[in-house]
Image (cartoon, rainbow, N blue to C red):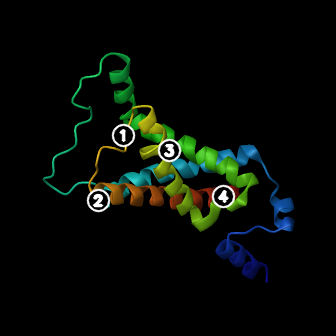
């Protein structure tokens, strides 16, 4: 009976009041589980780009910088934003934030994390990064393949983050 109930919880992605009391809410545990989930999801997102790359073989890469040469601070900021350490750091931070929110607002885990991934895609590509000048502005036209590859990789990120977060949270 207990095994069947646990399977229902995993399938429905809901938690009863009794289970909340049993495990308790903990911001630190939520952040830790989300951080681990975000790191694993960053690796999964990188792999998804290899499986479904934004450009086909032989297609030229888009230039990192616009035609007008930025100087000083703007150039340094763009180089840092393109670094692998920044991607891993942002993945970990997004996962930690997601873990904290999921701890107190379980509805945030809807669609097993896919909605989290789509929200990140919208915020990062057309939102905050573009506003800061760290990503191409939405006016720059990307190919359909680039858009779909990017969205798919963010959905993979969200689903992996939620799956790993859920497992880690149960273990700690």
Give the residue number, with chain letter if any, for mark 3. Answer: 91
Mark 3 vs mark 2: give the one in front. Answer: 2
Please name the residue shown 29% across and 22% down the image.
70
Which is more N-terminal, label 1 or label 3?
Answer: 3
Q: SS for tag 3? A: helix
Front in this rendered view, residue 109 or 69: 69
* Residue 144, disc: 2
Q: SS for tag 4? A: helix
* Residue 108, disc: 4
Front in this rendered view, residue 69 or 88: 69
Q: How far apart are the alpha carbons under marks 3 and 2?
A: 24 Å
Give the residue number, with chain letter if any, for mark 1. Answer: 137
Which is more N-terminal, label 2 or label 1?
Answer: 1
Do callouts 3 and 2 mark residues in contact (Cβ within 8 Å)?
no
Q: Where is residue 90 in the image (x, y as percent from the top left)?
A: 50, 40
Mark 4 vs mark 3: give the one in front. Answer: 4
For this orientation, the residue located farthest to the top is 72
Q: How far apart are the alpha carbons under marks 3 and 1?
A: 21 Å
Do callouts 1 and 4 mark residues in contact (Cβ within 8 Å)?
no
Q: How far apart are the alpha carbons under marks 4 and 3?
A: 17 Å
Q: Quadrant of the N terminus?
A: bottom right
Q: Where is residue 17 in the image (x, y as percent from the top left)?
A: 85, 65
């Amino acid at each position: 009976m207990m095994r069947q109930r646990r399977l229902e919880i995993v399938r429905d992605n809901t938690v009863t009041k009794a289970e909340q009391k049993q495990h308790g809410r903990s911001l630190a545990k939520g952040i830790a589980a989300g951080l681990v989930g975000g790191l694993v999801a960053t690796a999964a997102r990188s792999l998804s780009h290899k499986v479904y790359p934004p450009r086909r073989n032989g297609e030229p890469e888009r230039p990192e910088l616009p035609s007008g040469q930025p100087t000083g601070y703007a150039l340094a900021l763009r180089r840092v934003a393109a670094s692998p350490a920044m991607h891993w750091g942002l993945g970990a931070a997004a996962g930690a934030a997601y873990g904290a929110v999921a701890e107190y607002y379980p509805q945030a885990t809807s669609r097993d994390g896919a909605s989290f991934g789509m929200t990140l895609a919208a915020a990062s590509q057309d939102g905050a990064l573009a506003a800061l000048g760290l990503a191409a502005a939405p006016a720059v036209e990307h190919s359909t393949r680039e858009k779909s590859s990017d969205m798919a990789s963010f959905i993979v990120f969200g689903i992996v983050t939620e799956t790993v977060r859920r497992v880690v949270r149960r273990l700690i």
